[in-house]
Amino acid sequence: MAINKQHAIDPDKCTACTICVTACPVTAATRKFRGPKMTGPALTRLRKLVSDDDPMLDYCSNCKTCDLVCPSGVPISTLNMIAKNEYYKTHPRKSKADDMLAHSEKMGKLITSLPLGSTFANMGMSIGKAFNVMGAMGIAQSAKMPAYASESFISKFKKIKQNPYLRKVVFFSGCYINYNQPEVGVDLVKVYQKNKIEVAIDENFVCCGSPMVAGGYIDDARVNAAKNAALLKSWVDRGYDIVTACTSCGLMLKQEYQELFDFAGMAEYAAHMYDSIEYLAKLNDAGEFDTNFVNDNTKYIYHAPCHLKVQAIGRPSMELLPLIPGIDIEEADAGCCGISGSYGFKADKHEIAMKVGSKLFNRIKNSHAELGVCECGTCRLQMENGSGVKAIHPLTVLRKAYGL
Amino acid sequence: MLKTTVVVIGGGATGVGILRDLSMRGVDAILVERDDLGYWTSSRFHGLLHSGGRYAVKDKEAAKECIQENTILRRIGRHCVEATESLFVRAPEDSEEFEQEWVKSCGECGISAIPISMDEAFKLEPNLSRKLLSAYRCPGAAIDGFRLLWQTVASANKYGGKAMTYKEVTAIETENGTVVGVKIRDKWTGVEDKIACDFVISAAGSFAGEVAHMAGLTVNVKPSKGTLIAFNHRICNRVVHRLHKSSDADIFVPHGSITILGTTSIDSAPDDTSTETAEVKAMLEIGKITFEEIYDYRILRVFAGTRPLYSADPNAKGRSASRGFVALDHAHDGIKHFMSVCGGKFTTYRLMAEKVCNIVCEQLGVNEKCHTAEENLVDDPSPELMNRAKAVFPSYGAELASSRLGNEKLERVIKHIETDPEMKELVCECENVTLAEIDEIAAEPTSHTVSDVRRRTRLGMGTCQGTFCAYRSVGAINKENMPWAKDSVDLLKDFLETRWKGIRPVLWGNMLRDIELTRAIYDAALNLSGVEDIK
């Protein structure tokens, strides 16, 4: 497969220092996983030599905490994902849910294209749960699945009237915002317009491929990456910056594409890619961020998603949200929530995911916050599922503070 | 005092081959080795089972022997041979005329050399330099020196042959011009003993001159040092040769989890295993022609061994000396029933043993023919045993452990893990070696150091070069029952020193970072250098 050589996907950089093992949330939760060092660089050497059953590959959730802590710059989780992709070419899949969860866009498209599709789909999920249909599909019985919206973000976007501005961004909404939480996308347009930014979308964008990679379908992700990378490059060539409001989409487009694939122009567009809040924080640094907020006396607790941390862009939400008068916001700083995209929905991983997230759930409960805040859609779902406290996107907080 | 018919001196490929051959013919034999099996030349090589292609142009006899033995060993030694096949590739620097002559010669020697397009070659081996011009597939293979030796001995054991390690021969005793026995001394206990015998075969390789000297004879061995580089992972999945007149640093062998590049040829002392940075740099420059990105690959270590080249002319040196072997019957020098075997190639170890044993058996009046090509060195593990192995070993561990241990020990190790599941924990994560395997091998009477355990398990031979498994293995070895394992500090120092020896000349890049971690653990955290003061 075409591996980007610049990123040196080989086991040579690892010094076996084991820091990744001490930081891995899954290793801490289950002894079934021997940790990132072993599954990544160590076994990469042996996989070149022998073939064997490798149940551990499934336990890596691709949260990328290992990559973050590695002092040697080894793309450990990506080594795992590549190995997983290769592995399932010759081995039967263990979870029936893999295909559906990895290709969530297919599902989203189908459901939102039918009249009342979302109503039936959401109802179907609760009925299905009652009859253990989900269990038969490999979905954890007690997992709270994301609900589908009745109208996609793209459809909603077309109805929004925008003022034209010189500063233009193209918004890569991603599947979760498009099909599950379109209102977050609307929040982005409103907040950006308030800051004199014109937002474009591109209906030709396809799923970033993050769930495909995590599910061991890198070859499918490659098809999507080729399409998205060419489109993103063309937007940047036309003077647009790119923003995402999902940190997993952002990480995938900006960094993982380059680790996994070798398409032209990726480094060029990646230099113009921002997380939606990071982009506003940049305006704030330049003194161009609109701070005409109304009071918000809500008590919030902020959780930084793993895929934001690994982008090494700091905590832009914790820079901007405290600027809102009256706000009470603190960072949870309690590690991974456990869900890792689709990992925690799987029947055999749900318990691990809840165990990984337990520190965060307790932290949220003990904070007595009214609302959780997080950039990642499935993290928010997991936070709600684990703590009972509703969680929203920081853009939603900003929109409310602007009184929009 | 022990008694046998034949004493074989030297536990390298030649010696164990002779031990097995004699044993299978029903001749009583004991092999004595001064160090561990395969401590010297027989592990200090590429790990290459030649197809004969390398010798096809220059030495057709050797080439034919190679392909013949290659075919036999791939059959009887499939638990130490990895049938990778080999590629011969021609670079712009290499002569086109030579290529034509080589193709013709391979045909004449019966070596299959299938021409393939460069597109095909790059598909098979993506890391090959795009500047290469032609490629041929040949039946070369990788072979594990340590495993071949132990498996050959295991096969000899079945027929009553014995091998004793750490027994140094101190004298060869004669009566009336005929050999009657040898004196030996145990390296660890210093206890001396005698083995009475009718025949002595010196298969001491580069040390053959020293052994002959004990009987007052002269054998002209010209040891020639070859240096080899071990890379951290498999750069290629096939053996890759440069298609040109044999030269330095032109063979890459995927050896287990690593790749070995070699070699060089420098006249040396028999025990010279030293290596220098300059040699490594020169080899990398040549290796770069085959694999352009060679400087990006992490070097694990560098090692060297000496070829026991024999020359009747005491002035002949280096590559021009014959790689063929000689069996010197010292009856011509006035001592009967004493023979020295010199030279030869690892690939043809079985054939060499056959030829030597034919001579010996004739003198002993034994008519039994050689059977060594007919029987596998070790039996295949049964599917039931492999299923049990797969159930207890961590991923990728069962097959590796099976080939390292052999059936008998494999079954014991499996049983051990079945009764105590904690024993499946990995001591060496780089090479996938379990606690149960360490326990099994450390308890062998042939184990006296952690390095002995290493040679049989690959403990400490991977990426971290012992950083993590040194303290784990020293901690894990059951000290109650093993007198040699009492002093943990000495064990650690000895083991780390052997690892450090191979790393010192290549201390740059990722290996430098790794060794800093080693230093932090052993020097800073454990204060291993300062511990003498406390003791």
Image (cartoon, rainbow, N blue to C red):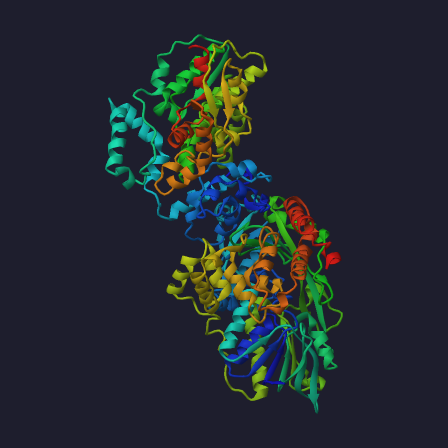
| Residue A321 pos. (x, y %) | 51, 18
> In this orientation, does residue B280 appear?
no
| Residue B474 pos. (x, y %) | 60, 59
> In this orientation, does residue B160 appear?
yes
Q: Is residue A90 left or right of residue A257?
A: left
Q: Is residue A48 left or right of residue B315?
A: left
A369 in relation to B137, above or below: above
**Which quarter of the image is occupied by the N terminus of chain B?**
bottom right
B214 in relation to B531, above or below: below
Tell me which residue sits at (61%, 53%) in the image.
B465
Q: Is residue B349 left or right of residue A60?
A: right
The front one of A348 and B397 is A348
A171 in relation to B257, above or below: above
Instruction: Tell me the quarter of the picture where residue A29 sits.
Output: top left
**Which quarter of the image is occupied by the C terminus of chain B?**
bottom right
| Residue B386 pos. (x, y %) | 41, 62
B293 in relation to B405, above or below: above
The front one of B137 and A227 is A227
How many marks do you count on the picture?
A: 0
